[in-house]
Amino acid sequence: MTQELTRRQLLERAAMGGAAITFPGILAACGSSGSKASSGTTSVEQKLAKTLNFSNWTLYIDTKGQTHPSLDAFEKKTGVHVNYVEDINDNASFFGKIQGPLSRGQSINRDIIVLTDNDRYLSLMIKKGWTEKLDKSAIPNFKNLVDVQKHPNFDPDREFSLPWQSGMSGIAYNDTLTDPVLTVDDLLENPKLKGKITVLNSMGDAMTIVMLANGDDPTNVTDKSWNAAFKRIQTAVNNKQIRQFTGNDYAPILARGDLSAAMSWSGDIAQIGNKHIHWNVPEAGGALWTDNMLIPKGGDVYTASVYMNYVYDPKVQGLMTAGDPKRKIVGIYYIPPVKGAGAAAKQFNPSAANNPLIFPTAKTLSKVKIFDSKALNNQKYLEQWQNLISG
Amino acid sequence: MSLFHRHRGLTPYLLLAPGVLFLTVFFLVPLGFLAYQSLQSGNIDFGYTFTWAWSNYSDALHNYRAQFVRSITYAGIATLLALVISYPVAYWIAFRGGRWKNLLLLFIVAPFFVTYLIRTLAWETILSDNGFVVNTLQTLHVLGPSGRLLATSTAVVTGITYNFLPFMALPLYVSLEQIDGRLIEAAEDLYASKLQAFLRVTFPLSLPGVVAGTLLTFIPAAGDFINAQLLGSPDNHMIGNVIQSKFLELTDYPAAAAMSFILMAGILIAVFLYARLVGTEQLTGTAG
């Protein structure tokens, strides 16, 4: 029995560690049979690495000048140096960059990466087995994960992923240039806004918003609802109503006053902080998406898990999200996935803690939907969408 | 040393070796891989297999003809504009620059010290709807009151012209600078007017620069996608945008590879026609 258990552990280790398995590593696995597997998760050598390589999106962590206080505090606490790199600009190009080495079984020299659930690549990474299993025994704070995030369809038991932050997609408008724009009808069909609006190039976000406006269900897409929403956006392109399809890059154009309204993300608008630019969930509803931390194959599971545990401490999360004006710390301003973060944020930055874009009310959250993940992987839809947005 | 003496015939090959090796490893091998990939079929979920899928090529041509034509058109206009703008500048620096020559050349290269992306984003600000340029054009009634420059083909061509201008100006300068001033004097001594001397002596002698400059501008411009993405609307997207989206967004590597080959073939044909038109000796600068 002991023999069998050890062997199973060994196989699991081999499956997880991939090419990184070493002879001393095998010995360690043999020696630790039983004791560390007690929590029911896979046992790995629980030793902190010297460095944690963390790839994240730009402007997506607390900052103070050139430093990131939450990372500094983590280094002080654990002695692990965090090599924090902001090299993710969109899911597709980042996936394009890492899929080569991963498909050849090579490590990408990163311990944590962050991908979004409104794009196909997050589920693809997990489906292809390119991610390591989290060491839940090192993440007791997992209990603080908000309930709605506990069982996503791409990772039903949260074995491979943990949310970093969430955001809502809706409509922003500039009140010096237009009357309030609160509906898709207005955005896509009001002739006064011709050539003065942009639409998100993220298929999941844009389609969720338009489908809701059509009275269709974006969580369960059918060819009929797809075609209706697609046709509506196509018509707006043909009528030259839509100026561009954008990612984050709508922000400077909107701030400059070239756009009257833009389909946009909640956190960006909170970050712009311009009193003339207002963001709303459209009347018929908006989209909700979540960025998820993953440990790519070959990453250091234990160290990455210890870091995830750290950010799931409500105090740490509260500060990261809301910042602290007294200490000149700027927060992320997106929506934290950690219970108690809102209460903690009140201590540091009450105005952010009361900002409905960062800590949305239950009523707002009931109006935002998560796009159907089957549709995200539908090659026909993807091609139609890409052809639309790339002319 | 004795090796060189005994095998004198080997010397040219040894000298060529580093270049050939470099081109083989970093150009021919990837190109071969791209060709192989362009004939595959499949998708990212189940993997790609080599199936001689020539349909990748016919589909690309059929579905994206507009973008191919647009790429060649935009690049062509931008090349022509760059030539018209930089020829007088290069001429002036070469013949009238005097001791300021190096400084003036530095000014032409100066934008290169800033990243491509930032330079293009700067144009987004310059051409913005509430900016100086649009306001002026509106006052002059060149643009209607609701007219704009951003997200139009004008903005895309302007951006390309600006970004590739130094590739045109520098070869022009080099070929103009090498012209022996006595030849122009001789032409004038033989009663040629300034214009005649330019048309029959200076311009023909500068042709290698014109050819090099147009090629260096046209080739990368045809494959560019940054300008169309940032300064254009979906109606102005070029084939580079389609390849980028096929490769990165749709992970349809075979289609992206096939389109890259079609673009390459298109450019090669254009260059070939151009070379036949102006004469191959201008390409290598061995006129005379």
Image (tube, rainbow, N blue to C red):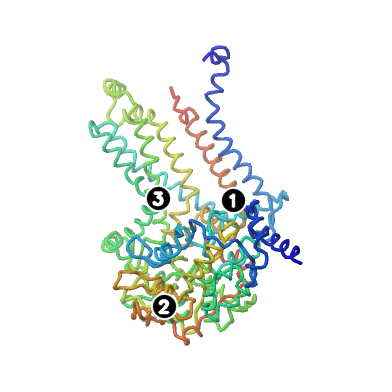
Q: Work out which quarter of the rendered image holds the N terminus of chain A and state it.
A: bottom right
- Residue that numbered label 1 is attached to: B259
Q: Secondary structure at mark 3?
A: helix
- Residue that numbered label 2 is attached to: A358
Disc 3 versus disc 2: nearer the observer: 2
Is label 1 in contact with label 2 (beta carbons under 8 Å)? no
Circle 1 residues within 10 Å: few <14, some 14–19, many ≥20: many
Return the mark for residue B116: 3
**Amino acid of disc 3:** Tyr
In x, y percent, where is residue A215? 56, 84
How far apart are the two marked residues, 1 and 3, measured between alpha carbons? 24 Å
Q: Secondary structure at mark 1?
A: helix
Among the 4 quarters of the image, the one containing residue A152: bottom right
How far apart are the two marked residues, 3 and 2, measured between alpha carbons? 35 Å
Circle 2 residues within 10 Å: few <14, some 14–19, many ≥20: many
**Amino acid of disc 1:** Met
Q: Chain of mark 3?
A: B
